Image (cartoon, rainbow, N blue to C red):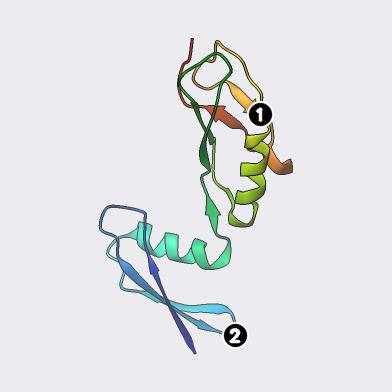
Amino acid sequence: MEEKTITCIGCPMGCQVMVELAQGEIVEIKNFKCKKGKDYARDEMTSPSRMVTSVLPIKNSKEPLAVKTQRFIPKSMVFDCLKEIRKIKVSLPIAIGDVMIKGVCGTDVDVVATRNLN
């Protein structure tokens, strides 16, 4: 039997959730204080995913543009996603929600602007 401790990020409590595994399968999840903790630990052990955020310089703007994925993507794709974001060349004006990359890394998740820049 193997035990892993995961710090839950589902809410501000930051529970130290214990996951017991046998032959790579989840046997028990304990030490969570809410359903989010249990769900987070299960998802983290079976299919970890992350929201990606980044900034990029904009030509003729003193302020960088903050961008993010619209939803979580598989954790294994985070660095490839960041490489694609670094390739973006955009110009002003930019509106919040504008799609900067359609279907990043072959997923159905877009990278969007998180603010307006004129």
Q: Are marks 2 and 1 in contact (CB under 8 Å)?
A: no
Q: Where is residue 69 in the image (x, y as percent from the top left)?
A: 55, 37
Disc 2: CA contacts within 10 A as few (<14), some (14-19) or many (>=20): few
How many numbered discs? 2
Q: Which of 111 and 37 is in front in this view?
A: 111
Let me know if residue 107 appears in the view: no
Q: Is residue 103 above or below residue 4?
A: above
The label nearer to you, 2 versus 1, is: 1
Q: Where is residue 62 in the image (x, y as percent from the top left)?
A: 46, 18
Looking at the rendered structure, the kind of residue marked 2 is: Gln
Looking at the rendered structure, the kind of residue marked 1 is: Ile
Which residue extends farthest right? 106
Q: In this view, does 10 lie above or below 6?
A: above
Residue at 67% x, 47% y is 80
Residue 23's disc number: 2
Q: Which of 18 and 86 is in front in this view?
A: 86
Let me know if residue 3 appears in the view: yes
Q: Which circle's residue, 2 or 1, is located before the other in the chain?
A: 2
Q: Mark 1 points at which residue?
A: 88
Which image quadrant for residue 91? top right
Element assignment for label 1? loop
Disc 1: CA contacts within 10 A as few (<14), some (14-19) or many (>=20): few
Residue 2's disc number: none
Residue at 54% x, 15% y is 94
Residue at 46% x, 16% y is 116
Element assignment for label 2? loop
Which image quadrant for residue 88? top right
Q: Which of 41 and 27 is in front in this view?
A: 41
Distance from disc 2 to disc 1, alpha carbons, whole Å, reads 43 Å
Q: Position of residue 71 (x, y in %)?
A: 54, 40
Q: Position of residue 15 (x, y in %)?
A: 30, 65
